[in-house]
Amino acid sequence: MRKTRRVVLFAFDGCQLLDVAGPASAFGVANSISGRTAYEVHTASPDGRPVRTSCGVTLDCIGLRKATALPVDTLLVAGGGAEAMSESIKLPGTQRSLRRALDTAARFGSVCSGTFILAALGLVESRRVATHWASCDLLARMYPRLAVDSAALFVVDGRLWTSAGVSAGIDMALAMIERDLGAAMANRVARFLVLYARRPGYQSQFSEVLTAQATANSRFEDAIAWLQDRLPKRVDVSELAARAGMTERTFHRKFLASTGMTPAQFIRSVRLDMARTFLESGLPLKTIVKRAGLGSVTWLNAAFTRRFGLSPTTFRKLSRAQAQS
């Protein structure tokens, strides 16, 4: 008989909606695709009352004690603002029921800043954890015995799973689905959710595109966004310059000053990031080269090794080994 896994998502007033809804949606889609109740998902609050999330949406909940009366396979704690988390930790239902539930769950963890709640309850001392990049330094200062991974999307340390900011909770849920139901099911769920790609836990919280968009002058934003859809094709710097309304020489100078990279370096870097993502999917190298606009497998091998310190084939083997660990 195929097992139904009990999942409890801990919410509280002021928590982040996506920290709860993201993983819940992934597990729910797994149920729909598999045609059975692979996951029984419950949203629980300290006292069973509805909670108002930070964006104003209210979630119906059951009491945490009731939700954990039966054995729990996965218990995830949502994140939220510092004040909201502090208030939730003070509640008797959090102090007693959450600590007991986390002690007994087969797999437990947090999404985004929910790591602070786990740390406050003394359940992750001397463990390796992830949290939102903006909170990594604070978490490390408050709990110096933690090994805070400031780059990873999510971290698995035994039965402890912790993820970075909001959307990374979906990546972590997909990794859980892969562990439970296999890679094929996880890939189907990701496709149904219309995700660009499944991201492994050790992938950085940052991408070249997002970093450039965050640091670049606003005049470059349209050119950077346009580039993403053009990567499989030949892209000339002159085309990017035209998108920004500049001469090629002026564009080169101002882009370098704004992002720290020449336009050509940026294009290569984005293409290699895309290739790294495609390597996770198991696509043949020739297909990856075509989709990322990299020219040839030989060029991919050389450039990828220079950038990441290992060959594409070795990277793929290591990523598979980590996924199965």
Image (cartoon, rainbow, N blue to C red):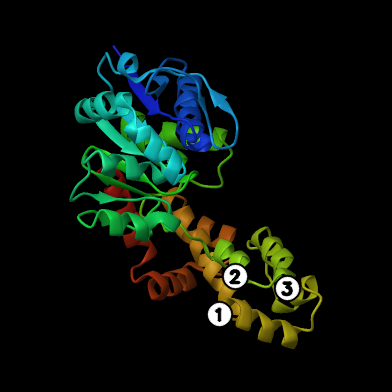
Residue 259, located in which quarter of the rendered image?
Answer: bottom right
Instruction: Name the amino acid, label 3.
Output: Leu
Q: Are marks 2 and 1 in contact (CB under 8 Å)?
A: yes
Residue 261, located in which quarter of the rendered image?
Answer: bottom right
Callout 1 secondary element: loop
Q: What residue did someone put label 2 on?
A: 215
Instruction: Name the amino acid, label 1.
Output: Gly
In the rendered image, the vertical position of residue 148 relative to residue 60, given as above or below:
below
Query: Toward the viewer: 200 or 135?
Result: 135
Callout 2 secondary element: helix
In the rendered image, the vertical position of residue 6 relative to residue 199, given as above or below:
above
Residue under the image location 53 percent in, 62 percent down: 289
In the rendered image, the vertical position of residue 44 relative to residue 117, given as above or below:
above
Relative image position of residue 313 (x, y in whole percent): 35, 60
Considering only order in the chain, which callout, 1 or 2, is on the residue closer to the N terminus? 2
Q: Are marks 3 and 1 in contact (CB under 8 Å)?
A: no
Quadrant that contains the N terminus: top left
Residue under the image location 79 percent in, 84 percent down: 247
In the rendered image, the vertical position of residue 109 relative to residue 25, given as above or below:
below
Q: What residue did someone put label 3 on?
A: 240
Residue 65, located in which quarter of the rendered image?
Answer: top left
Answer with left or right where residue 210 lies relative to residue 68.
right
Foreground tag (3 vs 1): 1
Answer with left or right where residue 60 lies relative to residue 251.
left
Considering only order in the chain, which callout, 2 or 3, is on the residue closer to the N terminus? 2
- In space, the residues marked 3 and 2 are separated at their CA atoms by 17 Å
Disc on res. 260:
1
- In space, the residues marked 3 and 1 are separated at their CA atoms by 16 Å
Instruction: Name the amino acid, label 2.
Output: Thr
Callout 3 secondary element: helix
Relative image position of residue 214 (x, y in whole percent): 60, 65
